[in-house]
């Protein structure tokens, strides 16, 4: 297929009627929203997506590779799954790597919009311009690995598959979409939306790389930026050597490694579960890279009993490890493998188990409610594996856990023990120890999330400069900048890890060479700001109040009890008004008409 990357072509598939339409997008929208996260959110918002029930046929499910996906741009293989989240009620835009997104662009498609719902299980196959729906009753109930194998066998080698497992079929609100067996569009319950539509899988095979506007300039820009990534200490050394788990000991040493459901900020057994342990115990067999990636932070692992999989990554290792008080790397790895096979978001799954552990140990969950199941106690290797399965199949207490920790803790009368923002579980950085990250958590457009603005980069890692993690000075402006830049990176289809080595100027050079748009850095950042504000407007229309720009009481009122950040709390009350101000919003968190006009919204 091929075609210029600025020629956005869309597949619109109505599962209720079985009809498939092929459309194009106004090129002006591509310049305003790029692709991936930005363009898909624009189309979802324009369709009235904020007002629908997330699990109803009216909700749209959009698979959207980024603007540069499928090109030779460094890490140019990312795609987004955009929909209304059943977990949070916000806009969901879950990012994944691997090869699926690039393959979709190679088939000539910038977006697949799934509408309606099928009465029986189906899967969608895309081979360039040939698009078909197939019966999938024989796949329903299978895990993601078995599903992928079956679809590849039916469609032929070279096909890349995105699918759901039992968690998505059972409408778990923390279900993920898994592509290439091990890559997850993990957060916000996008797998449940796919399950509600009875769509088991999408298989894609493409023939032609997208065409860029200025081939010679693009090639030189890519070559230069690949070299920058290779020479950078993080993207060229640390991540290739230890993967994302290079962070374990760093974050623990800084006193913000959440332990026992965020009750503590340090984990005494860190050396038994960190990235070095994965290597030293010889569980790590090789590193793996996504499409067009020189970083290769992926981990291919094999355990002593012969079980194999990818990971665990930093967030997963922490969620099933320190957050649950577990120091057994084998059990942590097995829980990770299960999440990929059953189709669960590892962060929400692990933190939900930790919440159950705290509820149970505090006597809030009666023993009778376990129905002779494993006791969920901190440190239990057996519990993290048992309850991961239970959530995917909605068995016993797992039926309630499958909808995340907020709903579960609320049902037992203690919502304050759920470490969530906008009902989504917070990742592996205690906000009491990093004030900028605390503000980013509270204001994230998709709930508790670290990859909508990774303030750990300057506050802990010192990139692009070192900030005092407890200082409030300038943090609101830093958060806005990181949020806007991340929106650009996601919409371009690049990996967030490139931002350790590349700047906004580098991204503008890459995008300009590919598209011919000639963005200035300020114009590109304005594009990110437009996408961020569009998401905010979607959430407001969906009934998400600015009052939800907050954090759990534990972080605001309970000082950190241990470690280097002992005594600290998240100072959100001081940061939030300044953030609204730098955003150009009113003090109540609502964007002014002038701001919306400025952004052409």
Image (cartoon, rainbow, N blue to C red):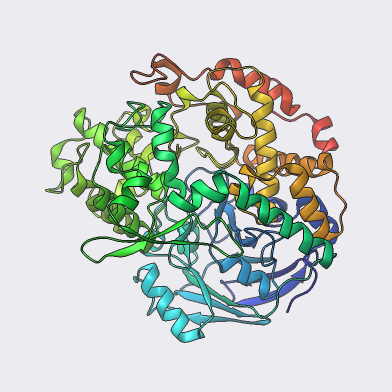
Q: Position of residue 55 (x, y in %)?
A: 50, 55
Question: From what the image shows, is residue 171 above or below residue 484?
Answer: below
Q: Looking at the rendering, which quadrant does residue 456 occupy?
A: top right
Observer-nearest residue: 159 or 40? Answer: 159
Residue drawn at (29%, 56%), measured in percent from left and top? 282
Question: From what the image shows, is residue 570 above or below residue 379?
Answer: above
Q: Is residue 85 visible?
A: no
Q: Is residue 250 visible?
A: yes
Q: Report the side of 157 relative to 515 (left or right).
A: left
Residue drawn at (58%, 33%), measured in percent from left and top? 455
Question: From what the image shows, is residue 138 above or below residue 341?
Answer: below
Q: Where is residue 559 in the image (x, y as percent from the top left)?
A: 39, 16
Quadrant of the image containing the C terminus: top right
Observer-nearest residue: 289 or 490? Answer: 289
Give the farthest residue toward the front: 231
Residue drawn at (56%, 50%), measured in percent from left and top? 236
């Amino acid at each position: 297929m091929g075609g210029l990357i600025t020629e956005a072509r869309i597949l619109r598939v109505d599962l209720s009627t079985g009809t498939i339409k092929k459309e194009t997008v106004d090129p002006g929208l591509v310049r305003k929203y790029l692709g991936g996260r930005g363009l898909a959110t624009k189309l979802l918002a324009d369709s009235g997506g904020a007002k629908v029930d997330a699990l109803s046929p009216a909700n749209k499910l959009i698979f959207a590779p980024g603007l540069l996906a499928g090109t030779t741009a460094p890490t140019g293989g990312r795609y987004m799954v955009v929909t209304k989240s059943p977990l949070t009620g916000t806009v969901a835009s879950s990012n994944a790597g691997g090869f699926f997104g690039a393959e979709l662009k190679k088939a000539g498609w910038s977006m697949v919009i799934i509408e309606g719902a099928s009465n029986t299980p189906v899967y969608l196959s895309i081979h360039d311009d040939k698009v078909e729906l197939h019966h999938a009753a024989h796949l329903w109930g299978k895990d993601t690995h078995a599903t992928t194998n079956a679809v590849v066998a039916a469609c032929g080698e070279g096909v890349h598959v995105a699918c759901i497992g039992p968690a998505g079929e059972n409408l778990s609100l923390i279900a993920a979409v898994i592509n290439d067996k091990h890559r997850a569009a993990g957060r916000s319950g996008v797998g449940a939306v796919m399950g509600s539509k009875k769509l088991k899988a999408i298989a894609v095979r493409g023939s032609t790389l997208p065409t860029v506007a200025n081939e010679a300039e693009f090639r030189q820009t890519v070559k230069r930026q690949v070299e920058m990534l290779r020479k950078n200490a993080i993207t060229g050394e640390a991540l290739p050597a230890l993967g994302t788990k290079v962070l374990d000991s760093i974050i623990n040493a800084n006193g913000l490694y959440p332990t026992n459901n965020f009750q503590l900020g340090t984990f005494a057994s860190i050396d038994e579960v960190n990235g070095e342990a994965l290597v030293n115990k010889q569980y790590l067999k090789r590193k793996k890279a996504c499409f067009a990636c020189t970083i290769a932070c992926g981990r291919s692992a094999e355990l002593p009993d012969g079980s194999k999989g990818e990971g665990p990554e930093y967030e997963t290792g922490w969620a099933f490890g320190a957050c649950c008080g577990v120091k057994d790397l084998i059990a942590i790895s097995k829980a990770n493998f299960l999440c990929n096979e059953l189709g669960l978001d590892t962060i929400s799954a692990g933190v939900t188990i930790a919440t159950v552990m705290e509820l149970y140990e505090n006597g809030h969950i009666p023993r009778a409610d376990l129905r002779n199941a494993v006791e969920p106690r901190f440190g239990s290797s057996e519990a993290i594996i048992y309850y991961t399965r239970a959530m995917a199949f909605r068995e016993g207490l797992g039926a309630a856990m499958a909808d995340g920790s907020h709903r579960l803790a609320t049902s037992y009368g203690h919502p304050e023990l759920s470490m969530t923002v906008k009902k989504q579980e917070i990742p592996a950085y205690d906000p009491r120890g990093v004030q900028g990250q605390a503000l980013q958590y509270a204001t994230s457009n998709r709930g508790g999330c670290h990859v909508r603005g990774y303030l750990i980069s300057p506050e802990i890692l010192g990139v692009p400069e070192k900030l005092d993690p407890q200082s409030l000075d300038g943090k609101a402006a830093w958060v806005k900048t990181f949020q806007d830049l991340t929106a650009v990176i996601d919409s371009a289809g690049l990996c967030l890890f490139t931002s350790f080595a590349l700047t906004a100027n580098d991204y503008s050079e890459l995008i300009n060479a590919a598209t011919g748009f000639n963005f200035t850095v300020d114009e590109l950042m304005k594009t990110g700001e437009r996408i961020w504000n569009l998401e905010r407007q979607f959430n407001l229309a969906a009934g998400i109040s600015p009052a939800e720009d907050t954090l759990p009481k534990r972080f605001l009122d309970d000082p950190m009890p241990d470690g280097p950040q002992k005594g600290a709390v998240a100072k959100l009350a001081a940061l939030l008004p300044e953030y609204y101000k730098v955003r150009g919003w009113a003090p109540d968190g609502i964007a002014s008409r002038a701001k919306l006009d400025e952004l052409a919204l």
